[in-house]
Image (cartoon, helix red, strand yellow):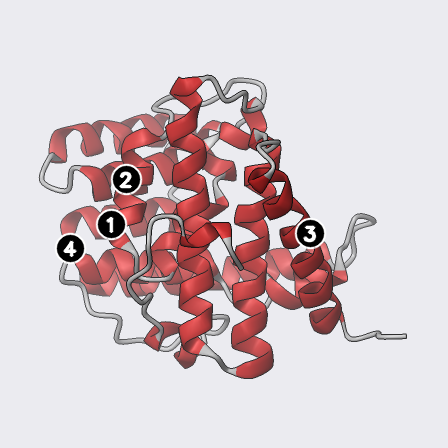
Amino acid sequence: MRHDPLELAEENFTYQLQRALARVARGEGTGDTLASIAMAYRVLAICALLRNADSERFARLLCKSGQVRLHLLERVPLGLKVPAPVLAVSNDVGFCAALAGGDLVTATKIAAHSPRARFEGWEDEEDFLFFHFLQQLLRAPSEADPLLRLLDRWNQVVDGDVTPFFSVCQALLGSDAYRFSTALGEMVEARKDNLRKYRKQLDFDPELHATEGKVYLNGLALIRLAESRGIPACERYELLPRPALMARCPTLSEDAWRSP
């Protein structure tokens, strides 16, 4: 019996991915099915990095996660039923996966098709504003006024309590390398603190902790976004291993996600 949570994660998410892809191939894919495929590719990308130091596969699987999210969003206007928690911007695992993999084209398309308002009752406004800001920055990087309005609304929501997430967005908008580096470092520390607390929770999942808990993909996504704005990533951070920073997605066909 296997006890290594990383190995178990690879085994279980590979199985989930194969089943979900088979449902899509039979024409039975739902919004939940596509969301599970996006998540599976994301977790398996981390497995490839941590188990085999395979940076190329890491980036490729992240890009596939982004492709799935884009496919889901493109099908919503055609009648695909997607539950609010799945459609919510702050629950979108594919956008940051595409960014982290270096596929800014797909990430930009995701941003263009994503909801522009939060789902009240399902989505925390501060979480929504963070991811919505990143998407709008990528979609329309030269339009400063809408982004400033988002930051102003965010400031109202938190009543002036500046968080690292808020600071990193300000730094991205202002192309402030020092502030970006400082804020990202604080985000990594916050992530580590949350992971320590997560280990004590009743719903603790060893497999997710062994994957998402070891590589901070949202932090990697921020570095990619910063690079696109001419902000160099000069610092080294925990949870952002060098092989992940060096990874870049190869050119993939639009339907590459349909096969593992």
**Separation of residues labelled 3 and 4 (CA atoms):** 40 Å
Callout 3 amino acid: Gln
Dot 2, how many residues are within 10 Å of its Cα: few (below 14), some (14-19), or many (20+)?
A: many
Q: Return the disc, 1 or 4, that comes first in the chain's sequence.
A: 1
Query: Which element type, helix, strand or loop, lies under badge 1?
Result: helix
The disc placed on residue 16 is: 3
**Separation of residues labelled 3 and 2 (CA atoms):** 26 Å
Q: Which residue is mark 4?
A: 175
Q: Return the disc, 3 or 2, that comes first in the chain's sequence.
A: 3
Name above or below for residue 41 compared with residue 232.
above
Query: Which element type, helix, strand or loop, lies under badge 4?
Result: loop
Count of labels shown?
A: 4
Q: Is label 3 or label 2 in front? A: 3
Q: Return the disc, 2 or 4, that comes first in the chain's sequence.
A: 2
Dot 1, how many residues are within 10 Å of its Cα: few (below 14), some (14-19), or many (20+)?
A: few
Q: Residue furthest front?
A: 26
Q: Which residue is mark 1?
A: 105
**Separation of residues labelled 2 and 1 (CA atoms):** 6 Å
Q: Say which residue appears at 44% left-offset and 41% top-offset.
A: 69
Q: Say which residue appears at 59% left-offset and 30% top-offset.
A: 30
Query: Which element type, helix, strand or loop, lies under badge 2?
Result: helix
Quadrant of image for the N terminus: bottom right
The disc placed on residue 109 is: 2
